[in-house]
Image (tube, rainbow, N blue to C red):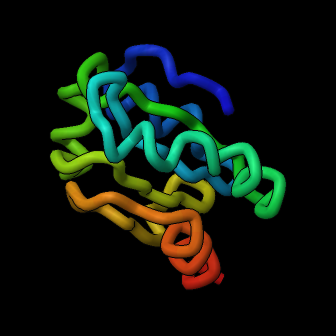
Amino acid sequence: MEQLAKMDLTDLKKKIEKGKYILFFSADWCPDCSFIKPAMPEIEAEYKDYNFLAVDRDENIDLAADLGVMGIPSFVAFNNGEEIGRFVNKDRKTKKQVEEFIDSLN
């Protein structure tokens, strides 16, 4: 999974303007983020239509705020730059819940 560099909303919109993206917001200190991280390679392999970007919420706090992401781990999906769905809250997420979220996008 590509680690998103520190950027603002304008730069992010340029990066994701073509294609399908899922942004995975997390932080190193977050135990619920550590819970889902081991499942992410499998999820990525299962959903090859999407480009997955890891976003360090603390490093990109302004971007997270602009996107309304405060709780982590969280996921925000885009298609050609337009938001198509979000799974945003502070609760622990299972692999099955993340897969159900992605399935709901189609």
**Residue 104: horizontal and vertical position, in percent?**
56, 84
Marker count (numbered): 0
Q: In this view, does 92 lie to the left or right of 51?
A: left
Q: In this view, does 4 lie to the left or right of 73?
A: right
Q: Is residue 27 above or below residue 94?
A: above
**Residue 91: horizontal and vertical position, in percent?**
25, 60
Q: Which residue is drawn at 52% across and 24% down?
A: 4
Location of the C terminus by quadrant is bottom right
Location of the N terminus by quadrant is top right
Residue in the foreground of this view, choosing between 79 and 87: 87
Q: In this view, does 14 lie above or below 20?
A: above
Q: Which residue is drawn at 19% across and 28% down?
A: 62
**Residue 5: horizontal and vertical position, in percent?**
48, 15
Toward which corner of the image does residue 79 lie, by quadrant? bottom right
**Residue 26: horizontal and vertical position, in percent?**
37, 36
Residue in the foreground of this view, choosing between 87 and 8: 87
Residue in the foreground of this view, choosing between 64 and 10: 64
Q: Which residue is drawn at 53% across and 67% down?
A: 98
Q: In this view, does 95 lie above or below 31?
A: below
